């Protein structure tokens, strides 16, 4: 499925469609260039999942954990700054991926071989100010 986002206000509706279309999915891997809007879309997904915290990019700490109003966890990963697979393995990220909770992964290409089989690939591309979101 491909959706077009003309303005940021449309992202909450897109997040709803994504969650409905992949109701059983828990692992979402976001592919796209730097600054294309991966974190912004994840913020919309977190709003739809009733996250109590304010989601921010985990660029420097690699993993952020959010709590929902239903007292469940959501994990947000940003592997942009990861330097090696051993760094990924030392963090124990694979355990998060198989925990059954939502995991939103930015820069999954850095750890591609370790992604679980059943993940949702989300591709975001910016063309002339519009975001094309394919999943």
Image: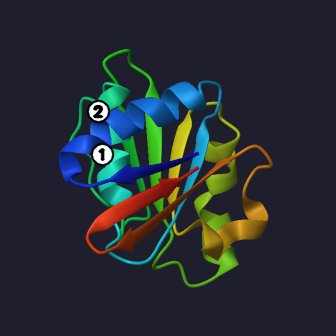
Residue 37 seen from this side: no
User: What residue occupies the far top of the structure in this picture?
Assistant: 70
Identity of the residue drawn at 46% across and 55% down: 133
The residue sitting at 24% across, 29% down in the picture is 52
Residue at horizontal 26 percent and vertical 55 percent from the top: 6
Question: Percent x, y for residue 71?
Answer: 38, 19
Tag on residue 121?
Answer: none
Estimate the spatial distance between the alpha carbons at disc 2 and disc 1, rounded to whole Å.
6 Å
Toward the viewer: 118 or 21?
21
Left of 68 or right of it: where is 118? Answer: right
Which colour assignment does the render follow? rainbow
Q: Which residue shows up at 37% across the image and 71% down it?
A: 126
Quarter of the image that includes the N terminus: top right
Q: Can you give x and y, in whole percent of width and height, for residue 36 in the image?
A: 35, 70
Q: Nearer the viewer, residue 46 or 84?
A: 46
- Quarter residue 81 falls in: bottom left
Q: Vertically, is 100 above or below 92? A: above
Residue count near mark 1 (Cα–Cα under 10 Å), binned few <14, some 14–19, many ≥20: many
**Left or right side of 31 for 38:** left
Disc 1 is placed on an element classified as: helix
Q: Is residue 87 visible?
A: yes
Residue 115 sits in which quadrant? bottom right
The one nearer the camera, 37 or 26, is: 37
Q: Which residue does the numbered mark 2 point to in the structure image?
A: 47
Residue, disc 1: 43
Q: Secondary structure at mark 2?
A: helix
Residue 118 % position (x, y): 76, 43
Q: Residues within 10 Å of mark 2 (few under 14, many from 20)?
A: some
Q: Quick check: marks 2 and 1 in contact, CB under 8 Å?
A: yes
Q: Quadrant of residue 58?
A: bottom left
Location of residue 110 in the rendering, given as x and y in whole percent from the top left corner: 62, 75
- Above or below, comparing residue 62 to residue 96 in the picture: below
């Amino acid at each position: 499925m491909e959706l077009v986002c003309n303005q940021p206000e449309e992202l909450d509706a897109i997040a709803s469609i994504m969650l409905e279309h992949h109701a059983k999915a828990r692992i979402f891997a976001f592919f796209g260039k730097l600054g294309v809007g991966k974190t912004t879309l994840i913020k919309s997904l977190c709003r739809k999942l009733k996250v109590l915290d304010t989601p921010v990019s985990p660029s420097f700490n690699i993993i952020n954990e959010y709590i929902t109003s239903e007292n469940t966890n959501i994990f947000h990963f940003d592997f942009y700054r990861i330097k090696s697979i051993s760094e990924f393995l030392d963090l124990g990220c694979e355990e998060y991926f198989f925990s059954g909770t939502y995991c939103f992964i930015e820069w999954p290409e850095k750890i591609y071989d370790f992604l679980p089989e059943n993940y949702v690939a989300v591709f975001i591309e910016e063309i002339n100010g519009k975001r094309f979101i394919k999943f």
